[in-house]
Image: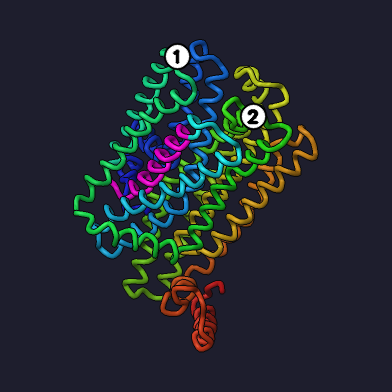
Amino acid sequence: MAGIGFQLRRLARQDTISSIVAAAGHAAVIAAGPWLFTIFALAAISFIADQISGRDVLANFRAIVIYGFATSLVMAAPVTIVATRLVGDALWLKRPGDVRGLLLAAYAVTLPLVLVGVALETLLLKLDGPTTIALAGTAMLVSLIWVALAFCGAVRDYRGVTLSFIVGLAIALVATISVSIAGFEAPGLAWAFTAGLTATFMGLSGRVFATFPQPPGPIARSLAAMVEGLKRYHRLMLGSLLGTAGVWGDKVVFWLSNEGSRLDNGLLHAPAYDSTMFIASLVIVPALSSLVMSLETGFFDRYQQYFATIAGHGTLTQIEAARQRLTRYTLEHLTLITVSLSGLAAIVILTAPIIVDALGLQFRQIAILRYGALGAVFHFVFIAATSILLFFDRRRRYLILQVLFFSLNVGLAALSLRLGEDTYGAGYFGACLISAAVAYVMAERTFERLNFLTFLGNNPSIVGTGGAHTPWVAALRTRLRRALDRGGGIAG
């Protein structure tokens, strides 16, 4: 929903350092708010409460939060991406009154899915009752935050959204450390942590409700629209499910291997691999922030100009010029962000021994950190390229790319385990590299064929809602495609 929501362009275009930093900070929250919340909170709690609760209790607590985060991300993603699309459609059709109902429907559909995920984990890992209940509570709240944050793409109060995360983080820290001092075990710490999550969730939901005050109407109607959307946009649903599962695929492979170990509460982890890869993943945050700023400002301006030229009955030459401006801006900025990210990754790679020593990690984790930092560069390219595909409704290709990433990350992680610890992390790097290369080619090809896709390839009157062509429409499609090729030099 770039361009209709956060007014980052106003901050980004001011010439002061403070405004640019503020815009980057808000963009980082938009791109990875729950992720950053979890990382900073766990780091601070572990540092402060280490001498209070003990390492075993903190390890169990961290595992509950991480599993809750992972479960919520995977199970909520299909609903979140479809709900985002439905909100975009509603706003495009000038029906803001639908937003509240869609938000409530997304909440209602997400929670049972998350509970199914927690139930499967409980059965497979044979978790005890307190751990299961704490895990369920954490996963449910984080999933609601994911959904609310997606809807906040239509909210203009970005300061309120950022403040919701800051307040939630502060409450989580105070509450968790307080119960740690009181002598509670890991489930108690997890419940205290959810106090902060609850504050963030309420803040985000409040921003959406304040922006769209219209009554939601019958919840049954909104639920029906949500279910219909999941059917209509099934490729988005499956793609997001596999894509988010793929993010955790290599971790799960290591959890189930000889490198993994079982905590007292039954949860599996691979300390050497997990901690290093989480550190490496932080490299991608500045790039995601820059990507959001780019999509919200220059990209969306040129995106609007391109379709405004078409709506204004511009000539083929004018349309082609608008397409070239959009293509040039997007690919140039993607290259600039990637180059900057590569420089940051290079610093991490060169200073890996210093970082490992400073954090008290093991020497063998240096290689994992380096592969993780390299992988983060190409993971960003993959995320950016697939996001571009979604802007132009290339759902089939989006699904194909997510299947590719999931398969590669799981398969190559398993291969790295067979090859030995010198290659740990190389599987993630290889999966990101190959997936990014394929995704970039698809994105570039989409820009080349944008005129054809706009008039024919993605035209519902020609393609149909299911994407199938009748014989006569297919013949017409071929004729028009050739005519456009001859008339405007458009790549077919």
- Position of the N terminus by quadrant: bottom left
Mark 2 crowdedness (10 Å alpha carbons): few <14, some 14-19, many ≥20:
some
**Label ID, residue 183:** 1
Foreground: 286 or 180? 180
Which segment did they paint magenta? 133-155
Of callouts 1 and 2, which one flags the residue occurring earlier in the amino acid sequence? Answer: 1
Residue at 55% x, 51% y is 243
Q: Which residue is mark 2?
A: 262
Q: Position of residue 314 (x, y in %)?
A: 36, 73
Q: Position of residue 130 (x, y in %)?
A: 48, 29
Residue at 54% x, 33% y is 282
Q: CA distance from mark 1 to mark 2?
A: 23 Å
| The magenta stretch spans residue 220 | no
Choose top left, top right, bottom left or bottom right for residue 270. Answer: top right
Q: Position of residue 268 (x, y in %)?
A: 62, 33
* SS type, badge 1: loop
Q: Name the side, left or right, on which 340 lies relative to 81.
A: right
**Label ID, residue 433:** none
Please name the amino acid that badge 1 sits on.
Gly
| The magenta stretch spans residue 136 | yes
Task: Determine the residue located farthest toward the bottom in the rendered image.
Answer: 472
Q: Position of residue 136 (x, y in %)?
A: 45, 37
Residue at 28% x, 65% y is 93
Q: Is residue 472 above or below residue 457?
A: below
* SS type, badge 2: strand
